[in-house]
């Protein structure tokens, strides 16, 4: 099993920045990809960004150029730097981990709220 704990959410004005962090523990050696998904109430969870153990990254079109995912394999952490935030970025953000480089995540954090005011 893998446990994921997020931190860094909060309230920010449009145009501002936030940095989310996630620490992984447990069966770390089984993890390949780590990333972030988000969910707005009443809607499906959507991929925000992922990064594989080898450093390949993938971003949703809606966040390209504004968000940056980074990973520290030695510390078992993954971060999401979010710049130029928009009200439509408001959601609960979930840290994820996957045993494979692609596909639906195997593990999820508890989520952290990000609210962007206009």
Image (cartoon, helix red, strand yellow):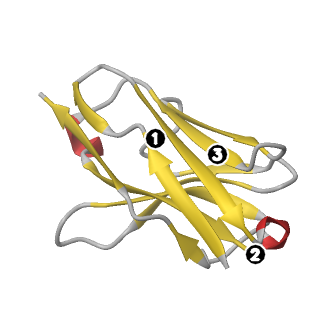
Specify the quadrant that holds the N terminus: bottom right
Evaluate whether residue 104 shows in this view. Answer: no
**Above-or-below relation of 3 to 84:** below
Residue 59 in the image: state x and y as whole percent: 57, 49
Task: Give the residue number, with chain letter if any, for mark 3.
Answer: 78
The mark closer to the camera, 2 or 1, is 2
Secondary structure of the residue carrying tag 1 is loop
Using the numbered discs, state the Cα–Cα distance from disc 2 to disc 3 in whole angstroms.
Answer: 15 Å
Q: Residue at x 71, y 71 (%)?
A: 102
Residue 97's image quarter? bottom right
- In three-dimensional space, the C-alpha distance between marks 3 and 1, rounded to whole angstroms, equals 17 Å
Residue drawn at 84 percent across, 44 percent down:
74
Q: Residue at label 1?
A: 63
Which residue in the rendered view is the most extreme toward the front? 26
Q: What element carries label 2?
A: loop
Residue linked to disc 2: 99
Looking at the image, is 51 positioned above or below residue 30?
above
Percent position of residue 25, x then y = 68, 61
On the image, the x and y values in percent for residue 75 come to 76, 43
């Amino acid at each position: 099993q893998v446990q994921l704990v997020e931190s860094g959410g909060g309230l920010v004005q449009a145009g501002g920045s936030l940095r989310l962090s996630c620490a992984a523990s447990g069966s770390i050696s089984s993890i390949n990809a780590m990333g972030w998904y988000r969910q707005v109430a009443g809607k499906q969870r959507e991929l925000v960004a992922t990064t594989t153990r080898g450093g390949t990254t993938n971003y949703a079109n809606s966040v390209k150029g504004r968000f940056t995912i980074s990973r520290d394999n030695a510390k078992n952490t993954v971060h999401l730097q979010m710049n130029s935030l928009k009200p439509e970025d408001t959601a609960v953000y979930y840290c994820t981990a996957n045993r494979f480089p692609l596909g639906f995540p195997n593990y999820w954090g508890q989520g952290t709220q990000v609210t962007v005011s206009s």
